[in-house]
Amino acid sequence: MLNWFLAFVPIAIVLHHFAPGRYELVFITAAIGILPLAAWLGRATEQLADRSGEGIGGLLNATFGNAAELIIALAALRAGLYDVVKATIVGSIVGNILLVLGAAMLAGGMRYPEQHFNLAGARAQATMLTLAAIALIIPAAYHGLVGELYAGGEKSLSISISLVLLVVYCMFLLFSLWTHPSFFCGVNLPDDETSSQPWSLSWSIAVLAICTSAIAWLSEILVGTIEPTAQALDLSDIFIGVFVIAILGNAAEHASAITAAIKNRMDLSLSIAIGSSIQVALFVAPLLVLASLIIGPEPMDLLFGKGLILAVFVAVLITGQIASDGRSNWLKGVQLLAVYLILGLAFFLTPRA
Amino acid sequence: MLNWFLAFVPIAIVLHHFAPGRYELVFITAAIGILPLAAWLGRATEQLADRSGEGIGGLLNATFGNAAELIIALAALRAGLYDVVKATIVGSIVGNILLVLGAAMLAGGMRYPEQHFNLAGARAQATMLTLAAIALIIPAAYHGLVGELYAGGEKSLSISISLVLLVVYCMFLLFSLWTHPSFFCGVNLPDDETSSQPWSLSWSIAVLAICTSAIAWLSEILVGTIEPTAQALDLSDIFIGVFVIAILGNAAEHASAITAAIKNRMDLSLSIAIGSSIQVALFVAPLLVLASLIIGPEPMDLLFGKGLILAVFVAVLITGQIASDGRSNWLKGVQLLAVYLILGLAFFLTPRA
Amino acid sequence: MLNWFLAFVPIAIVLHHFAPGRYELVFITAAIGILPLAAWLGRATEQLADRSGEGIGGLLNATFGNAAELIIALAALRAGLYDVVKATIVGSIVGNILLVLGAAMLAGGMRYPEQHFNLAGARAQATMLTLAAIALIIPAAYHGLVGELYAGGEKSLSISISLVLLVVYCMFLLFSLWTHPSFFCGVNLPDDETSSQPWSLSWSIAVLAICTSAIAWLSEILVGTIEPTAQALDLSDIFIGVFVIAILGNAAEHASAITAAIKNRMDLSLSIAIGSSIQVALFVAPLLVLASLIIGPEPMDLLFGKGLILAVFVAVLITGQIASDGRSNWLKGVQLLAVYLILGLAFFLTPRA
């Protein structure tokens, strides 16, 4: 059904060229057009992952689920929209653990009174999130305390912390895929047989290439309309980044995490939701900082606004509590969604700067 | 024995009318007079709860234990003493988890080397407290970051967050009373047989009505003396609200929680202490915000001072750690009481604004 | 092998007297000279502890492992270098839980896929750390909120909180040594037989006295060179205090904690690392505040800079998560070390005030 949305791809491109003043229309059509492309990109990468052996399920799923976000963020980076890039990073971290995981726990909890997941893996992931939150808090604190005394310090600090995060992320992959894969195995069910026919290798690669190019194209169009659309709707760029773009980018994870929860495979659901947040925080964000040194108009730092940092901090705080006992129920889903709603209200009511 | 304090009810009223300048005397006598009334109100509601079936013990106990606080807060609200209302809310949240729970764990820990409680319920309650702390932090952060750009935003944000909290509170009741009551059952002992005779329905209702009216009357008197008493003792209104009034309002819970701990019924003790904090944060506070739209001289917001927010935050932080392993010992009691004492010292040393 | 470093003791003293301008050289030689003295002091106190009965292992070890730090801090206190004293306190708290525990978990995790430790004891220790972090946050918040209205308040608050912390520390000793020693027993192995010959009582006392005097002497020399050395290397005093001096002071714990982890005695390792942080926060810091009333040029308060407080807060936050499930693996070590590295980068890039 999602495939019908592919019709929005040409519509967005046509509108972009022939109705240049209708920014909201272009924004909406480009945004909708990206959804099925991201889904196909996800499927193609899953097929490639299956071929390369290893049932590394949720993690790889999340890895490639973020490809769409990375492409959008790179387009925004090239356009110098650093506020939007940062808002998208935070929106993706927060959205995955509050909205996606919350919806999954609620949906799963409606069917099962209590669901279980692998405690050791969930804790390792929650600690990774805490580490990521700390890595975002430190540069802002540094800015507040010594920023004006030594401006060059912020840039050096951002680059060094980015390198530390990338190394830690590699360690985490090593840990979860090689030395301790059992931490991330399901506690409930054997892996689902995927009933569908495997794709041929050339078909997988072709889909991957086409979707990546199309998303890149639409992203360029989308990014150019953010500012005028935000202005027309009287919303802040931050709100658009944290809630609208991040939700788009996470739509694929959203669907997979809920489906997994309904099938009582909470481990997969957690891996998708939290794993995706970890990947954005420890891999996408530092990568963008380093990429900005090459492709951006000027270097991007890791300095996030106070509102964004608070959002990450409270999200990580409550996720740590929720994930720390290996059980899930519908109330936990409600609690996560309530925090997401409260944050959403605060950002929605934030006027344009 | 507490009944002797009933004598202070007429004394307070007489002093209020015939010694109008002696504010401290009126404050103290009204405060002492409220204690036995709150206790009788608690007993009457317990009787009514027993009648309505369901052994929903601690939770209902806490629900009605807060009736006295709600009445006092409404009186302060009508008088426009919003600082006192907010201080009382925070004092009640903090006092229940640090002072009441701390004293209960210490008292219980003096008799038993280790006491146990239902882990799943304690964790659900601790997460609720974290949610409440987040709901108090966000409006203050909003105020600090965008408050001056868009003043109307604070009011909208306070009302929306209040509605979210009330919905979450209803969900929590649904969860604890209906879908997952077993999370809140004791792990140790069967329910105490209540040796005392059940009251007749009309007697229960009569006691309820009389106590409510009397508390309301005394509250009006008490509230009028807070400011001059604070001035006479050279204490801030905040200190009076956070420590004096909140301790009064929690006296009933305090006694029940300690008694339960000594009887080795830690689940009941935790339900009373943490449950009461949850109820104040997720039910009383938003209700007061909404009530202020009708009865207050102007709308009250959810914007708490930084000192109050920090107090809630540290209290919730340490309670989360203490409640997260299902065991209690005397050292945990000491740790909670130490945090309460440190907060008390800081507020005590805060000069009148 | 460490004993060869004893040669630096006379070198430092000679340089101090005959090369008064070469501050960096004096700083480095004095610092290296303290290392073996601290190790011998540790051995002497261990011998004395063994004699006095009780296999109270890790805790006593940590207690006397901090003697060197206390002596250095007292020297800095007498010289009025309060910023250095505070930085050393924070550096010691943070260094023990991030660097020492991180290195121990990493080293242990390289040999064993999963190591276990006594959960109840680790949680009690983690809660103590949270309490300590709260005790450091409150005076700074007080300063920010009411500092200027009532200057005398900060001094009273610092002294009162120091007294509360000392009482809580005594309670913690009572708990861990007397009422609940089993919380701190190992879960894995019987206590190592110490193959070495016990020392005679007079020898133990002689070593103790000689090392204490020598450390005190070198500390006076070291403290006098901190400021000029920091200036020569263009580093802030804070960085020197938090990272250089604190690492020196913790070198003994560092070695013991790693050795214990490699022998798969994680309980001992945790007791040394976290126990040492607790001791610095709840015993050394308040003792220094009280000592400053007598020996310092003016009273020292418990008011730490925002950067130092944030460092303690994030360290305690992540340690709470890491210690809360009774298991350790190499990734946890990496996570702790990454936070230490990020903090180190931020302080390293902080310019001299």
Image: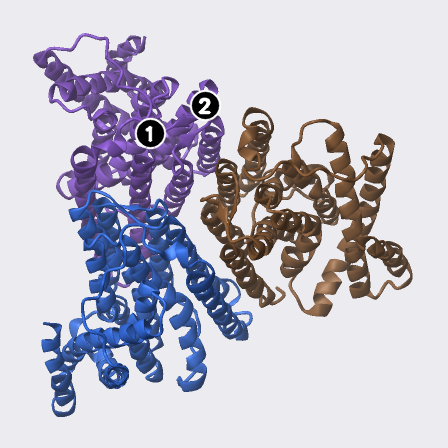
Chain colours: A purple, B brown, C blue
* A106 versus C246 height, above or below: above
Image position, residue C229 (x, y; %): 19, 77
In the picture, measured across the screen, residue A226 lies left or right of residue A234, that is left
- Image-quadrant location for residue C85: bottom left
Quadrant in the picture for the C terminus of chain B: bottom right
Where is residue B201 drawn, in percent x and y?
Answer: 84, 30
Image: A72 above or below C216? above
Label 2–label 1 contact, CB within 8 A? no
The residue shown at (73%, 45%) is B68
Element class at badge 2: helix
- Give the camera-side residue of B75 and B112: B112
Q: Sequence-wise, which precedes: disc 2 or disc 1?
A: 2
In the image, what residue occupies the spot 74% across and 49% down?
B79
Write down the residue under mark 2: A109
Disc 1 target residue? A270
Mark 1 neighbour class, 10 Å CA radius: few under 14, some 14 to 19, many 20 or more: many
Q: Nearer the viewer, residue C171 or C189?
A: C189
Badge 2 and badge 1 in a common chain: yes
Q: Quadrant of the N terminus of chain B?
A: bottom right
Q: Amino acid at mark 1?
A: Leu
Quadrant of the rendered image containing residue C316: bottom left
Alpha carbon of mark 2 to alpha carbon of mark 1: how far? Answer: 14 Å
Work out which residue is located at the far bottom of the displayed protein and give it: C18
Report x, y in % for residue A100: 37, 27
> Left or right: B285 with respect to B149?
right
